[in-house]
Amino acid sequence: MTIMKNFDVEKYLQNGKDVYAQRENIEKLADKLSKKEYQNIVMIGIGGTWMEWYPVAEYLHHLSDFPVYLENAGELLVKKDINYLTNKSLVLTSSDSGDTKEIVAAVKYCNQKGIDVYGFTKNPESALGKLLKESINGSLAECENAYLMYFMLTLRIYQNWGYYKDYDRWADQMKQLYPNLLRFREEFEPRAQSIARKYYNAPLTMTVGSGMLWGETCMFSMCILEEMQWVRTRPVTSADFFHGALELVDDTLPVYLIKGEDEYRALDERVERFLPKHTKSFEVFDTKDFVFEGIDDDFRQICSPMVITSLLTDRLASWYQQYTGHDLNFRRYYRQFDY
Amino acid sequence: MTIMKNFDVEKYLQNGKDVYAQRENIEKLADKLSKKEYQNIVMIGIGGTWMEWYPVAEYLHHLSDFPVYLENAGELLVKKDINYLTNKSLVLTSSDSGDTKEIVAAVKYCNQKGIDVYGFTKNPESALGKLLKESINGSLAECENAYLMYFMLTLRIYQNWGYYKDYDRWADQMKQLYPNLLRFREEFEPRAQSIARKYYNAPLTMTVGSGMLWGETCMFSMCILEEMQWVRTRPVTSADFFHGALELVDDTLPVYLIKGEDEYRALDERVERFLPKHTKSFEVFDTKDFVFEGIDDDFRQICSPMVITSLLTDRLASWYQQYTGHDLNFRRYYRQFDY
């Protein structure tokens, strides 16, 4: 068995059980919300939470034409009036700490307009916790927690609304999520070490992704490498890669291609064909290489961000820290003072 | 009078007259399209053209709730079905050469679904020219040409539909656009030289922008610096800057803040307050510093991408070329072979 760097297996599996245990609360909330007559769903995130809501919005768009909007909280606050944000909107948000400045301000703004907001925070006594009409109080520290809980809430609502029929089977199988993600971590561990050792001090790292994994591509770039490691990155979508970014490719620029299993995969594959012809410095992270036990294949798209976050924002991040010597918790600016 | 690097004043003003002379054709097309009963507008771009359509979509969203979608041609081609793309969609696109691979394929796809596409290309005999139901045949080589023509078409339609009332005054004043943009170039020329000299060989340059200028922020980053200069960049929105990217800021990383005049300006200003406290290496490009003659202030938002493109994708690019010694026309990969 692989012993993983800075990783407590028991704590992780217990965390998984704690998150899964929110299922009852989440379903109760979902069933209550399903009875209201909403005209759209508006998700509000910023930074990491925007990136986590991204694949949820993306997936819901696959299931139905029901309008789902993802808003950046900072931008929402400066837009004069967003016509679709009304008291007929189901507004969802999240903040692990519950005190993310823009999220708190955006929820206040909604409340002033008479719009209830529901969401996730580990801390019901936080500023956000107090502003939310109702909240689910689970830890969002691991991104897979966030994905699991956001999908539980929204897919249950979609099942109630007749837009999705597989919620119960999916939610039952999610009992197996954390043991699977643990195994994927173990399988990936040697590669995480070797990639971090090879590239931790590259002057710039390009990250390429798309569709269901675009949020995670940004998450690993912005939240891990930039914010937590002060490592310079250039995130770019697989479609945009061919319109500018490609000209930078040579052996001095590591490129990380994050490859998913949705319809955007064809765009990722195009990048994958290009890379080996023009650089030796690239890595492909393909969710398809990881085989779930006890989770059906038709749930792989939903689970793909959970796989990538296990590999990159957890394992690879941990090994970057080992080689850069830069503590993942150390910031010089973010939340250090007012700006 | 400032003599500008690699710039032919007479040719530029003549180009402006040629583009403006399309007004009659564009209005004729707009008036014809206005009579059809569309349910939405779908703009299709990729790379530079996506970035040019971006502020047009953004501005139309300010004027009306009428649904306007901007699609990346590469992504459109892999999405199974886009529910809002129907024969009740007014589909617009563009390609200067008329042979941009993804654009041609996307228009073919639309045609196969029985959807007419209208657009802009300098070459009516190109693959795109032949696929378009009707086309406006002006040069898109200067981005301000594209902005002017896209806005002429869409604002005229919006006036016809009752969503805008100032089209005639705006279009009349646009006769003065190119002389103004010429003067802004001249005013900016010494600064362009000094900035390029100072930063042309920086290992990474961060570009920050938002709202109406997000397209131009990407344009200067991806199309100029990355594609045409092989200079590494990190484009980021003013809102996202504070969630990751900010931790990279120090004197070794030039940051270019592109500051506009729409509601996102407050977000740009937040970045502007942050930067001088933490780095000496930053430049602010504020459209507000440039005063139009003969163009009313209420048109400044529409014109803001035209100002920035004059400064950055034209003048600053030209000076980068001078210092890097890298010809703006030289590519190693883009359009050099199949991929």
Image (tube, coloured by chain):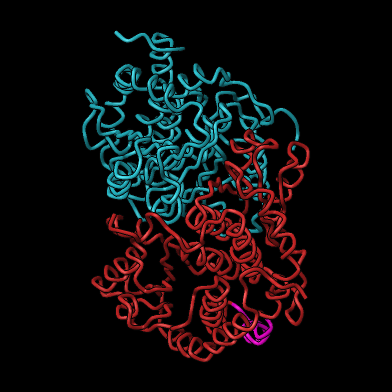
Chain colours: A red, B cyan
Query: Which quarter of the figure has residue B16?
Result: top left
Highlighted magenta segment, given as a residue range? A164-176
Query: Viewed as shown, does residue A282 lie left or right of B210?
Result: right
Q: Does the magenta stretch include residue B218?
A: no
Looking at the image, which is closer to me, A104 or B141? A104
Q: Nearer the viewer, residue A190 or A58?
A: A190
Quadrant of the image for the N terminus of chain A?
Answer: bottom right
In the rendered image of this protein, does residue A307 appear above or below residue A35? above
Position of residue B88 measured from the top left corner of the image (x, y, whole percent) = 52, 52
* Residue at (56% x, 58% y) in the render: A220
Q: Which residue is drawn at 54% across and 69% down?
A: A56
- Residue B155 at what x, y percent from top left? 36, 39
Query: Main SS type for the magenta part?
Result: helix
Q: Which residue is drawn at 71% across and 77% down?
A: A180
Given the current orientation, which residue lies at the most extreme front position? A325
Q: Position of residue B87 (x, y in %)?
A: 56, 51
- Image quadrant where residue A61 sits: bottom right
Q: In this view, does B245 lie above or below A244?
A: below
The correct choice, above or below, for A218 with respect to B148 in the image is below
Q: Which residue is drawn at 74% across and 47% down?
A: A272
Q: Check the picture and name the quadrant holding the C terminus of chain A.
A: bottom left
Residue A336 versus residue A221: which sits nearer the camera? A336
Camera sees residue B32? no
x and y, in percent, of residue A9 in the image: 65, 79
Q: Nearer the viewer, residue B160 or B98?
A: B98
